[in-house]
Image: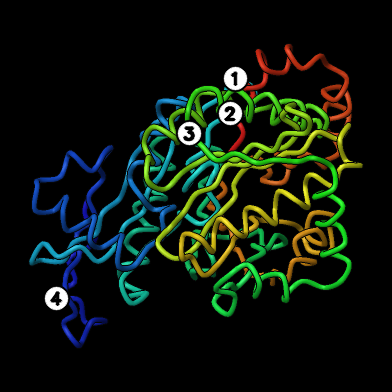
Amino acid sequence: MKGGDNRHDPSNPHNRPIHHVRMIRFTHELDSASHSQLDAFITTHGTLDHDPRWLSVLQNAMGHRPMSLVAQDEHGVINGYLPLALVTSRLFGRFLVSLPYLNRAGLLVKNDDPQVTAELIDQAVLLADMHQVDYLELRHDAAHEHDKLGFRRDEKVRMVLDLSAMPDADALWSHFNAKVRNQIRKGEKNNLSIRFGRDAAMIDAFYDIFSVNMRDLGTPVYSRGLFERIIALFPDESELAVVTHDNQPIAGAMLIHDRTSTTVPSASCLRAFNATNANMWMYHQLLLRTIERGNTAFDFGRSSEDSGTYRFKKQWGAVPHSTVWQYHVRRGDVQRMRPDAPGNRRKVEAWKKLPVWVTKLAGPSIVRGIP
């Protein structure tokens, strides 16, 4: 697919470069020079969320159909990139998302060029129409104006702690207020230990904790294979943390280390052990781990403002960063997929009552269809 040729367009008096937008499934479909150029482009302008390896993760672990849009000028120079995944489900419908599981894998455009931005969105809309999806969902930090993106959700924010002024454990400790320090100390008195790793035993321990917590929240659980694939395809950037109490795993987290920041996309603590303050103690250890790697920011993930998770993250000193998810809606209501939508509340409560083994069997096939 190609963007429009503007060489003879009177609305383009400055004769701006022509851009062509190509649709590819995987970056290996590019020639070696373009492949290397795209890697360099993402490294310079993007985040780890834009790494093409996520497309393989989503295909292999979630069954999504990956595709990408690459914008190049007439000299073959890459100026824009948009990874996408086609999500299909008999229960929920069809969606084109950039990207499931990640918070900000939307448009990546050099210098925010409005022409390249418009052409990438135009082609994404065409793909949405071609595949007859319910809606196209683009996940951004900030809005991109386009007449086809008529709906947006921005009620959730990423909570990020700036660690640039905390180069060591002492500086981090001094940053905490008295309440946070007290909660961490309570955890220290409860014979807690933490292990970081990537082996099968770590995946099992983390997934058992995660499955229980997702059931308790009334949310279908991802497959174990999702975390297995992330670990396999991001060997240098990903790891798991598991906290034990008297040799029993009770809390765990997945960490994704970017060039300068660490993100925790999934974390859980067994409610039966809330009294141990394991969750507070674990997050302190995760922050220490981030500093040890030389990273200067810790991303706690998205939360609705003033929610319980928002307040949990704020107490560490994290501050809100905007997220704007934009939609080209072809049919239906975007809000119907929210767990707090009227039609979903009873389903959430029913899910909480299921045995964990049932949710492990049924959850992955359900959640893969939820964008």
Q: Position of residue 7 (x, y in %)?
A: 13, 74
Mark nearer the viewer, 3 or 4: 3
Q: Quadrant of the C terminus?
A: top right
Residue found 26% across the figure and 81% down from its top: 11
Callout 2 amino acid: Gly
Q: Would you identify the image quadrant in which residue 157 lies? A: bottom right
The residue that disc 2 covers is: 369
Q: Which mark is residue 222?
A: none
Tell me which label, 3 or 4, sits earlier in the chain: 4
Label 1 crowd (10 A; few <14 / some 14-19 / many >=20): some
- The answer to whether the residues at label 2 and label 1 have Cβ atoms under 8 Å apart is yes
Cα separation between marks 2 and 1: 7 Å
The residue that disc 4 covers is: 8
Answer above or below: position of 251 versus 7: above
Observer-nearest of 163 and 18: 163
Callout 1 amino acid: Ser
Tell me which label, 2 or 4, sits earlier in the chain: 4
The residue that disc 3 covers is: 198
Tell me which label, 3 or 1, sits earlier in the chain: 3
Tell me which label, 3 or 2, sits earlier in the chain: 3
